[in-house]
Amino acid sequence: MKLVKYVFLDILRSKILIAYAVFLIAISSGLFMISAEPVKAITSLLNIVLIVLPLFSVVFASSYYYNAYEFTELILAQPIKRSTLFFSQFVGVGAALSLSFIFGCGIPVLIFFRDSSALILLCCGLALTWVFTAIAFLAVVYARDKTKGIGIALLLWFYFVFIYDALVLLFLFNFSNYPLEKMLMMLTFLNPVDLTRIIMLMQLDMAAIMGYTGALFTQFLGSSTGLVWCFFALLLWIAVPFILAQRKFTRKDI
Amino acid sequence: MIDIQHISKQYKSVRAISDIALRFNAGQSVALIGPNGSGKSTLMKCILGLAKPTSGNIYVQQKNISGSELYRTDIGYMPQIIRFPEHMLVSQLFFMMRDLRRHTNDLDNELFEAYHIRDMFAKPLGGLSGGMKQKVNAALAFMFNPKILILDEPTAGLDPLSAELLKAKIRKEKSKGKLIIISSHIMADLEEIATDVLFLIEGRIAFYKTLEDLKRETSSNNLGRSIASYMAEQKISI
């Protein structure tokens, strides 16, 4: 547990992380200042959060793992369990990324848009940060080579942010004669990015633009139980990749 | 102290170690030598639990190391020139290691003081030169008074004076009855500190004898030359 502190303090001093926070501040406060309606700003911000946040988390977490590799080796030569070290690195990276996000997005959002949906946006952002940190850690433990590992992590990001939606659309198009609403809802749970997008759109009362499925979503997610389910699913999206990654890490050769 | 029972290590397509069986005892200072890729690092990694042998077992102080981590309390490890986290301060590194090791009594600060590490405390590790990092690395390995020291190219990158200090320290610890395993390519250094020579070729033991025996058998006073002539006699080729 003490390790978390040291990992966290080391990362916090990295300039890239500071640049990331500054970038988020600029974007989010810029959006609020430009748009007349805060709701519009928060929708634009949502789109940025959904793309940039996973991308940065994936790249940062995977490059951290490789940069710290030799140090990892030294730590593992101490009487320390591998699972302890891995967990500390995960929590350290996730916490540092979360802090920059809260600093970069949280402060402007809370200044310009004090609302429950702003809070939900921040929770979604935090969840996405942890989900993609976990996914990146899963990708890198399987690849010895740095370029390959970061490449796989980036591909996973690309898959969840772009390819998955394309596949879903293709699927909908081909089976448009069948009632697919329930199916579509299931599919949403299989992609953390879509899941957070839906949560937010529901919050901002934009379900109407999604027609029939939207109605179903509102029925399910409009209730607070639905929201709890969504966040529970996001929690699983953090836990499952992390547990798989940790399993691999404790068994592999360093 | 360390009992290696027929271990082999197979990486995907390479057999790094094939069926090595040997013992290291307290008071020994073993020079681990061999050409590049002969399995020296892999053997060290197996002892440290960083790599897991494909078959065979390793016992450190009569305990099987597989699946345990506490046995490493007795091991000090000095990796080859290492990259520390850039932003961590030298002081933080030492505090962290002390935290991780838990037992903070009977610390061995000799190298720590000889290398004036306290003067570097406020510097980030990323700002240290290669030689300074190696000093930090050495001071850390010896700090917790471990019974076993595993040193991978310990003098690489050190200035002559610091290298001498390190060698003197190694000799001193050996005379206290510790086990020291050193991998190095610098024969002159090894000659000064080693009691035994373990020569690996292609993951197998080419020979494992005391330095005296080796010198006697080859009637040579120089470690480098006696290894060369031994290999010629035994028709060992690399």
Image (spheres, rainbow, N blue to C red):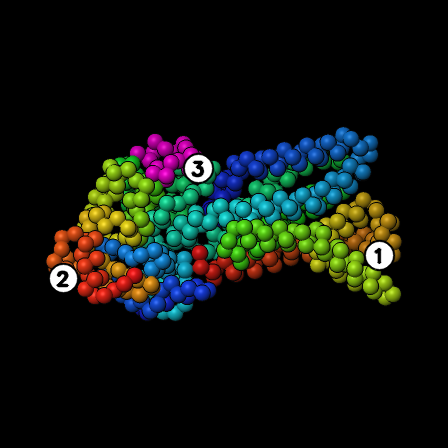
Quarter assignment of residue B28: bottom left
Residue A213 numbered tag: 1
In contact (CB < 8 Å): disc 1 and disc 2: no
**Chain ID at mark 3:** B
Left or right, A168 with reference to A92: right
What residue is drawn where x is 47% and y is 46%?
Answer: A68
**Chain ID at mark 1:** A
Q: Identify residue type, mark 3.
A: Gly
- Image coordinates of residue B237 in percent, x first then y, are 27, 63
Residue to which mark 2 is pinned: B217
Label 1, secondary structure: give it. helix
Instruction: Categorize mark 2 by other alpha carbons within 10 Å: few (<14), some (14-19), many (20+).
Output: few
The part of the chain drawn in magenta is: B116-133
Residue to which mark 3 is pinned: B126
Quarter assignment of residue A46: top right
Whether labels 2 and 3 share one chain: yes
Left or right, B228 with reference to A1: left
Label 2, secondary structure: give it. helix
